[in-house]
């Protein structure tokens, strides 16, 4: 039998209108006024916003990194995502030192199997040596992994030199694989980090000082240049600075296939957080680091200027205890913060409530564009034929973010005490209610692996 969501204000990537949504067999069957077809379940969404479930294309669940493992696995992480109105994610497969890509992908399938409560896909990170990874790119396509990630930072571990990066861009372009880039100048970062440590400057703020915004801007410019020569579209992850966005602006003006992602933390938090006493600044250590407020303001302006394509999280939670590894050496602090549960409410509050952004633009940035860019053809919008991944929001609910009420498996949130207007109260995945009135209705393991298509932009 069918389900009908009635009387809500339906927000798609194109428009907002009062309508009903008919759901059949996990799909959206129709969106129109006053649907009267018999249904086994009717949800009254009067005075509510009915939006697509969020699509978070940058997460790190159960990921080994810097001698430890991120706190959320595919169960706790996807549960937290669901409570925040996100109904699909794309997680990064990071090969270990002795892994080929096939072995690494199989590891990630085992991590997710039987645990995920929402649907998920994978990107694959390409780490040295590149010549071996290139031979497995066709395997990635066969298994539905149509995007790869390159690091221009983390010298001696994940970082690719320019020749290896260019080689990968050429091979990806041949196969229409979208290349995601972590753009910071790893050589200079390594130099600055060693310099500060030699001078006895070990506190968390020196993580930020060793990764100045100019090094992000330089790496973005270099990557755009190399990608242009190789004929490869590029997608820049977690951009944090005015310098980086200005390079994106110039590239878009020149009609280059360049796409930009940012995250809530780079709009809402500044580097002042690194000065919190008793080592608490370590909670905010991530790469790229938090910036001065002028960068936050510039990124928010870039949302309205059309320079940002996607808002994701880079969700990579480490507990404050795990962060203690860097108590005497900022370079040993595990890089990453939580955010998978708070992204959609924080961005609704910032973009729609505070900035007055059109609801469809909010949906485009957080749902539709990420789905299109990364080949999740059934996700990211409310229209007939799409999966019934739907979040019903109370747009007027005022609440305060508190760690004790969140579901992320970490002992803090960087957004503690933030007052937010708007919250998803009922969340559906493929037509099944998975969150209702702050209660989990789904069982771990119901989430399905998404074999993604090639990006329509590649």
Image (cartoon, rainbow, N blue to C red):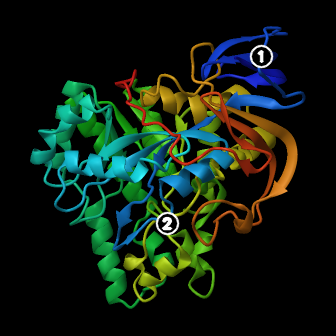
Q: In this view, does 224 lie to the left or right of 328?
A: left
Q: Is residue 145 left or right of residue 421?
A: left
Residue 297 coordinates in the image, percent (x, y): 64, 51
Q: Which mark is residue 71?
A: 2
* For residue 106, above or below residue 285: above
Q: Please tell me how crowded label 2 is: few (under 14), some (14-19), or many (20+) other residues with Cα within 10 Å.
A: many
Looking at the rendering, which quadrant does residue 4 occupy? top right
Residue 193 coordinates in the image, percent (x, y): 34, 76
Q: Please tell me how crowded label 1 is: few (under 14), some (14-19), or many (20+) other residues with Cα within 10 Å.
A: some
Residue at x 19%, y 56% (from the top left corner):
99
**Badge 2 or badge 1: first in the primary sequence:** 1
Q: What element carries label 1?
A: loop
Q: In this view, does 163 lie to the left or right of 429?
A: left
Inspect this view and state whether residue 356 appears.
no
Dots 2, 1 in contact, CB < 8 A: no
Looking at the rendering, which quadrant does residue 137 occupy? top left
Which residue was labeled with disc 1? 39
């Amino acid at each position: 039998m069918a389900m009908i969501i009635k009387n809500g204000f339906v927000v798609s990537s194109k428009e907002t209108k009062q309508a009903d949504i008919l759901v059949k067999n996990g799909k959206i069957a129709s969106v129109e006024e006053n649907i009267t077809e018999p249904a086994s379940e009717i949800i009254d969404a009067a005075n509510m916003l009915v939006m697509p479930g969020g699509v978070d294309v940058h997460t790190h669940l159960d990921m080994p990194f810097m001698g430890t493992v991120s706190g959320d696995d595919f169960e706790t992480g996807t549960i937290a995502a669901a409570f925040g109105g996100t109904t699909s994610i794309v997680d990064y497969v990071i090969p270990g030192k002795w892994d080929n890509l096939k072995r690494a992908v199989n590891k990630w399938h085992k991590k997710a199997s039987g645990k995920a409560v929402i649907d998920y896909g994978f990107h694959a990170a390409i780490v040295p040596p590149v010549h071996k990874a290139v031979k497995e790119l066709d395997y990635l396509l066969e298994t539905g992994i149509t995007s790869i990630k390159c690091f221009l930072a983390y010298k001696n571990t994940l970082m690719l030199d320019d020749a290896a990066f260019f080689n990968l861009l050429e091979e990806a372009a041949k196969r229409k694989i979208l290349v995601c880039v972590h753009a910071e100048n790893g050589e200079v970062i390594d130099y600055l980090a060693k310099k500060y440590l030699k001078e006895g400057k070990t506190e968390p703020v020196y993580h930020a000082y060793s990764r100045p915004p100019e090094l992000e801007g330089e790496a973005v410019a270099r990557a755009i240049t190399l990608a242009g020569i190789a004929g490869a579209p590029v997608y820049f992850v977690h951009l944090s600075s005015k310098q980086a966005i200005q390079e994106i602006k110039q590239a878009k003006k020149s009609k280059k296939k360049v796409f930009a992602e940012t995250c809530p933390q780079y709009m809402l938090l500044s580097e002042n957080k690194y000065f919190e006493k008793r080592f608490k600044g370590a909670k905010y250590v991530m790469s790229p680091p938090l910036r001065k407020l002028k960068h936050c303001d510039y990124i928010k302006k870039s949302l309205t200027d059309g320079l940002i394509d996607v808002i994701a999280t880079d969700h990579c939670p480490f507990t404050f205890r795990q962060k203690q590894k860097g108590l005497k050496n900022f370079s040993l602090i595990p890089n990453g913060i939580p955010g998978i549960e708070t992204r959609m409410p924080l961005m609704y509050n910032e973009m729609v409530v505070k900035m007055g952004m059109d609801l469809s633009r909010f949906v485009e940035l957080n749902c539709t564009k990420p789905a299109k860019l990364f080949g999740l053809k059934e996700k990211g919008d409310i229209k007939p034929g799409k999966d019934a991944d739907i979040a019903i929001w109370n747009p007027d609910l005022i609440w305060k973010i508190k760690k004790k009420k969140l579901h992320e498996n970490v002992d803090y949130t960087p957004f503690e005490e933030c007052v937010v207007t708007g919250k998803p109260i009922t969340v559906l995945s493929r037509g099944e209610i998975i969150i209702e009135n702050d209660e989990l209705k789904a069982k771990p393991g119901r989430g399905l692996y998404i074999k993604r298509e090639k990006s329509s932009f590649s």
